[in-house]
Amino acid sequence: MRSEKVEAMREQIISGPIVKTLLLLAYPLIINRLVQVLYNLTDTYWLGKLGRDQLAAPGTAWPLVWFFISIGMGFAMAGFAFVSQYVGAKEYEKANRAAGALYSLMMLFAVGVGLFGVVSAPYLLAFMNVSDTVYPYALSYTRVIFAGIPFSFTLFAFNFLLRAIGDTKTPVKINVGTVLLNLVLDPFFIFGWGPFPELGVTGAAVATMLSNSLGSLIGGYLLFKGRVGIHLSLETLKPDRHFYGRIFRVGIPSSVGSSTTALGFVILARIIFTLGAEFGNADVAFATYSITNRLTNFMFAFSDGISMAMGTMVGQTVGAKLYDRAKTIAERTMLINFTILGAGTLLFIFFRVPIFRFFINDPAIIAESAKVVKYFAASLPFFGIFSAVNNVFQSAGHTKKSMTLGIIRLWGIRLPLSYGLGVLMRDTAGIWLGMGLSNFLGAVIALAWFLRGSWMVRIIEEGASKS
């Protein structure tokens, strides 16, 4: 792995100007997230032309899909922590072995998840209490996405590994290319333009699967040819029980945290469908939730890009035992995130009606969106703080902290409050209020835990604490 490019970036990360380096690493990640959000918005736009039920299908499917993806993402995060800290400690060969172990593990795991998801999709959607009108669209969409999960997993592994060594540009080039391909393919498969079959909602899933597959193959080619900072080979992919054990020790809490978060959003979808049906129209409530998610994801593209760049810097500075610098990096990231999301929230509030009307001109959804602004929108800047702290814990390899923090915010605060306030207020406004309070309270808890400094211990030393 050792190269002049990797070493030069390492030096800038551990000793260069913090904000300048942060932005240098972040801007490709921000572009990547914006392009991905553009795809989600475009997907929503095209499906909105088919109708309310079709528009809700991807929003119904993705909590399920993300539950299983998040399990693999936990191990990807563990691999990221090891690789970035080994680079920070200048142990390049160990970093390369860690990369190979992660990649082979992700390939094996992904095949099992894909098969399970295709078979179990009907039962999972039934558990969510999906309405009869949305169910057939959600089922076909979910099954196609699950079939493509092996490619999604290996593409995630590629992204995490290159970000760990400070290369944020190469993954972005591939991701932008696959997303643009997705954007082009979407209307052709959805509406049957030209020689393409008219697949409706299923067409959106097919376009996503094909695009991710191409990106995964390109990423794998670059890794195995050694054309990026990491060079994988059959030797590095060989099972290493000792190192697998270390990845599992760090990765399992991260996987549990990520998957329970994803499962929590499955439960939240069930709450929205159930209370929405009781207080008015379940499809209106969930369609509003789906559009809101797309819009907030656009705002989070900026803060998430900066948080991910911070993760690379924190991982390498912790690996180099520069703990005070890691803390300063994290604090500046929180301030930047809060400012960005604060500005985005104001735009969201002022332009709510034309934004929602762009996706679907449905008076009921427009009316429901007013509750989003009143009870939820103001909490978004606080999620920027929560997200940054969560990323600090993961990048430092302290995945038990990250797991606990995520469970507290979602299972301890959001789900009970969203359901309880919804029932108490006899209105879907209670759901939005519960979601907003969870962002605020989660940020307070996260910041207090971060300031204790117990995450300032690197994991590449045998026996290091990960609690």
Image (cartoon, rainbow, N blue to C red):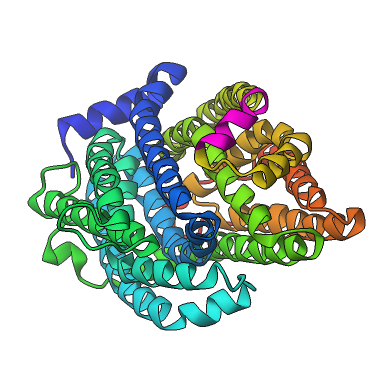
> For the N terminus, which image quadrant?
top left
Is 321 magenta? The answer is no
Residue 81 horizontal/vertical position (percent): 42, 49
Seen in the picture, residue 451 relative to 343 is either above or below; the reply is below
Residue in the image at 70% along x and 35% along y: 377
Q: Nearer the viewer, residue 76 or 153?
A: 153
Residue 18: quarter of image: top left
Instruction: Give the residue displayed 80% in from the left and 48% down from the top.
Output: 429
Q: On the image, which quarter does residue 407 sit in?
A: bottom right
Q: Quadrant of residue 347?
A: top right
Residue drawn at point x = 39 percent, y = 61 percent: 201
Is residue 352 in the magenta section? yes
Magenta segment boundaries in residue numbering: 348-358
Residue 437 can be seen, yes or no: yes
Please indicate whether residue 183 sits to the left or right of residue 317 in the image: left
**Residue 40 image offset from top left, x and y in percent:** 42, 45
Determine whether 246 is above or below 182 in the image.
Answer: below
| In the rendered image, the vertical position of residue 118 relative to residue 337, given as above or below | below
Q: Residue furthest right?
A: 424
Q: Among all residues in the image, which is located at the extreme left?
A: 225
Q: Is residue 357 left or right of residue 310?
A: right
